[in-house]
Image: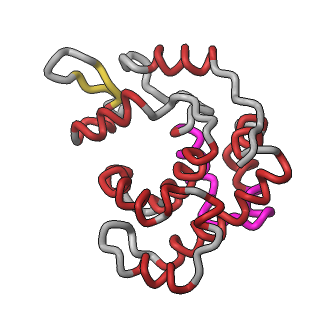
Amino acid sequence: MAETLFTDEAGVARCHWCRASPAYRDYHDTEWGFPVDDDRRLFEKICLEGFQSGLSWLTILNKRENFRRAFARFDAAKVAKFGEADVQRLLADAGIIRHRGKIEAAINNAQRALDLRKECGSLAAYFWNAPQDAAAISKDLKKRGWRFVGPTTVYAFMQAIGLVNDHAEGCSVRGQAQAARKSFRPSAPRGQ
């Protein structure tokens, strides 16, 4: 059986995967599994999960500020207007993952995110009202023209935004994430 927990120097039990660095632990303790309804953060998280495909999350986490700078702080309306010059700029940016397909997918997905906002009022309204099934969400997003949103990526996104709580039993943060989810009510759709 794989190890699911580790205990830090202070005796705090956490999910084993966040052991690698203090940045990983901070992400684990304050973000992962906690509900998100802010559209900019949702768009950022789904983009970063797409960039993570085939890589470690720690790689993405360490480059997150660079991604935010490079992708207009994940303002979907701005990213949707990126053109070939922006693609070339991003391909030359050593601070991010320089993968043409993933860069072009993020731009495409910004355009699709704007479409979802028009239809549902917000990304939050779409995701928080979707069935909690990664395969179903992935299939629907792909049907809508999204890219780099396979079931594994979508499930990681669901974990990241608190749609599911996969903190291990015994993890010191599991109960906090459960309590946050229990009291969470997504905001009403707002103008973007």
Q: Quadrant of residue 75?
A: bottom right
Residue 106 position (above or below residue 157): below
Residue 14 position (above or below residue 87): above
Q: Is residue 64 left or right of residue 166?
A: left
Given the current orientation, which residue lies at the most extreme left position?
Answer: 9
Q: Position of residue 53 (x, y in %)?
A: 47, 61
Q: Position of residue 51 (x, y in %)?
A: 47, 62
Q: Residue at x 33, y 57 (%)?
A: 63
Q: Would residue 29 be counted in the magenta stretch?
A: no
Where are the magenta residues, as a range?
Answer: 139-159
Q: Position of residue 91 (x, y in %)?
A: 41, 80
**Residue in the foreground of this view, choosing between 45 and 122:** 122
Main SS category, magenta section: helix
Q: Residue at x 20, y 15 (%)?
A: 11
**Residue in the foreground of this view, choosing between 88 and 180:** 88
Q: Is residue 139 left or right of residue 69?
A: right
Q: Is residue 114 left or right of residue 49?
A: right
**Residue in the foreground of this view, choosing between 35 and 17:** 35
Residue 77 position (above or below residue 42): below
Q: Is residue 46 left or right of residue 3?
A: right
Q: Residue at x 36, y 81 (%)?
A: 92
| Numbered circles on residues, count | 0
Q: Position of residue 89 (x, y in %)?
A: 42, 80
